[in-house]
Image (cartoon, rainbow, N blue to C red):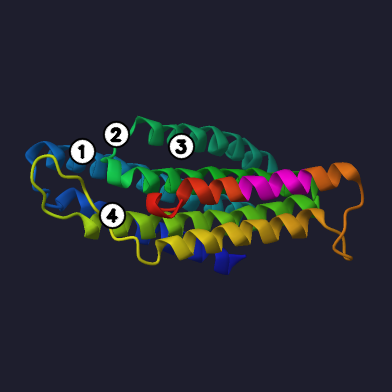
Amino acid sequence: MKKKKIQNIVIAAVAVIIIGSIAAYNYSVDQTKQKGLQFGIKLEQIQDEVKEIQTKFYSERNKWEEGSISKEELFEYYDKHVAEFKEVISKYDDLEPPELFESSVDLLKLSSETQLESDIQFIEWIKTGDDSAKIRSDTQFQESLEYEMLGLVEFYSAKTGVKNFEEGEKFDAPQSGLTQRVIEVSEDMKTRCDEKFKNAQGGFDSDQIEVDWFNCINEAEKWKIEHLPFNQK
C-alpha cells in the first residue's frame, strides 16, 4: 500500500511539472496565448491542491497508526477531506481550456473523481473493516492512476503538438500512441467488469448480475468512444 501511495504522490508531482510548463508556452496568436496562460496557471493550481489533499490524507492515517491522533479525530478529518476534495474537483468545471486541451482536462477531472471514490471506500474500510470496501478502494486507486497518466499523455501531446497557424486554421495535435492507450484503458475497464460480476466459471449467479455486467461493459465502451481521437471514432 505504501508503494502505491508513493506512486500516486510521484505521479501527481510529475503532473504539476508538466502542466505548469504550459504557462510559458508561446502561442502564435495573442488572444490564444493569453487564454492558454490563464488556463495553464489555473490548472496547475488545481493539480497542486489535489496533490496536497492526497498527501495530507495519507499523513493523517499515519498519525493515527502511530497513535498521534485518536480514531475519532481521524474520522473528523476524513469528513473534512471528502468535502474539501469535492470542492477542488468542482474547480475543473470553471476552467476555460483551449479546445485542444479539453479532453485532457476531462481525464484529469475523472482521475480526481475516481481518487475521491477510492478515498471514500478506504474510509469505509477503516470504519467497518469490510474487506470488499478495501478491494474497491484499491481498484479505484489504480483506475485513478490510469486516468491521470492518460490525461497527462493527452495534455503533453496537445502541448507539444501545437503548431504555428494563420488566422482561420486550427490547432493540430499528434495522435500517435493516444488511440492505443485509450483502447488499453477501455479493455482494462472491461476486464474489471468481468472480475466484478462473473463467477469462477465465467457465468453469472443471477440475471441482475448479468444486467449489471452488461451495463458496466457499455460504460467502458462509451468511455472509449468519448476519448478516442476524433478521426478514430
Q: Nearer the viewer, residue 93 or 200?
A: 200
Name the residue rendered at 68%, 50% in the picture. Answer: 217
Q: Which tag is nearer the camera, tag 4 or tag 2?
A: 4
Q: Are marks 2 and 1 in contact (CB under 8 Å)?
A: yes
Name the residue rendered at 16%, 55% in the picture. Answer: 163
Is there any visible trace of residue 70 in the rendered image?
no
Q: Nearer the viewer, residue 175 or 2?
A: 175
| Residue 215 shown in magenta | yes
Q: Are marks 1 and 3 in contact (CB under 8 Å)?
A: no
Q: Are marks 4 and 2 in contact (CB under 8 Å)?
A: no
Q: Secondary structure at mark 4?
A: helix
Q: Which residues are magenta?
A: 212-220
Amino acid identity at mark 2 = Glu
> Residue 38 has which mark?
1
- State the residue position of label 2: 96
> Residue 158 has which mark?
4
Location of residue 78 with respect to 174 vertically, above or below: above
Label 3 packing within 10 angstroms: few (<14), some (14-19), many (20+): many
- Sequence-first tag of 3 and 2: 3
| Residue 144 shown in magenta | no
- Sequence-first tag of 4 and 2: 2
Rounded to the nearest angstrom, the CA distance separating label 1 from label 4 is 16 Å
Rounded to the nearest angstrom, the CA distance separating label 1 from label 3 is 18 Å
Residue 186, position in %: x, y? Answer: 57, 57
Label 1 packing within 10 angstroms: few (<14), some (14-19), many (20+): some
